[in-house]
Amino acid sequence: MRLQRPPLFNARGSECRFGAATVRGRLSRGQAAASGAHRILALDLGKKRIGLALSDELGFTAQGLPTLHRTTIREDLRVLAKLAAEHGIAFFLLGNPLHMSGSEGRQVAYTKEFAGRLREFTGLPIEFWDERLTTAEAQRVLRESGVSIDRRAGAVDRMAAVLLLNSYLDALATGNVINGER
């Protein structure tokens, strides 16, 4: 028995699927199909670090990757493009840093600017997902699991990216993803 996920919609409202149909930009459909692109790379974007999480090939689980310690925008983009190529990424999932009220703050503009540069550099689509409370939840999980304060600081970004991606995958599995949002 093969499980099927509901359709995925990008930020422009058009349907996309894991695999060739999801990948746009620099790869043709044939190249995307040959590359097997169907994973999601989630980013918890910060000024100093970027937390990273990768979905499995079926889109059911999220696994944390080592946190990217930021240097320059050009180097950050190069590292992310390399990860995308190595893991067959269909699209990037970025946390949308909304206020608790749902309104956009200054960080949203920064995130969207970074997303535009990432899209241009890699040719891959970007989806945004509500990241409210992911960092707080990551800190709580790490604190409750007994991780020391020193190790917690380095792990919180990765955990936040895992929580972001898990939230997205859970919503996708229940059909609660429309136009890249809940």
Image: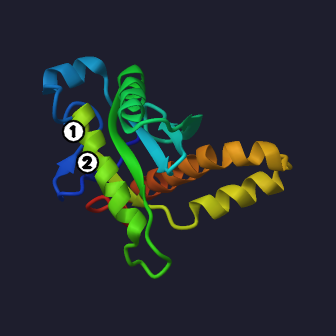
Expressed as whole percent of the image width and height from the top left, the position of residue 135 reads 61, 59
Residue 47 horizontal side relative to residue 84, left or right? right
Q: Quadrant of residue 125?
A: top left
Q: Residue at x 39, y 68 (%)?
A: 106
Q: Is 77 situated above or below 165?
A: above
Residue type at numbered disc 2 = Gly
The residue carrying pointer 2 sits among few (fewer than 14), some (14 to 19) or many (20 or more) residues within 10 Å by Cα, namely few
Give the CA separation, mark 1 to mark 2: 6 Å
- Residue ID for mark 2: 116
Specify whether residue 86 is in view: yes
Which secondary structure lies at badge 2? helix
Q: Is 100 situated above or below 135?
A: below
Expressed as whole percent of the image width and height from the top left, the position of residue 40 reads 40, 39
Expressed as whole percent of the image width and height from the top left, the position of residue 54 reads 49, 36
Disc assigned to residue 44: none
Q: Residue at x 40, y 32 (%)?
A: 80
Q: Is 32 situated above or below 108?
A: above
Q: Residue at x 16, y 54 (%)?
A: 14
Quarter holding the N terminus is: top left
Expressed as whole percent of the image width and height from the top left, the position of residue 65 reads 57, 33
Cβ–Cβ under 8 Å for marks 1 and 2: yes
The residue carrying pointer 1 sits among few (fewer than 14), some (14 to 19) or many (20 or more) residues within 10 Å by Cα, namely some
Residue type at numbered disc 1 = Glu
Q: Residue at x 71, y 48 (%)?
A: 153
Which secondary structure lies at badge 1? helix
- Residue ID for mark 1: 120
- Viewer-closest of 65 and 30: 65
- Viewer-closest of 154 and 135: 154
Quarter holding the C terminus is: bottom left
Q: How many marks?
A: 2
Q: Is 175 situated above or below 86?
A: below
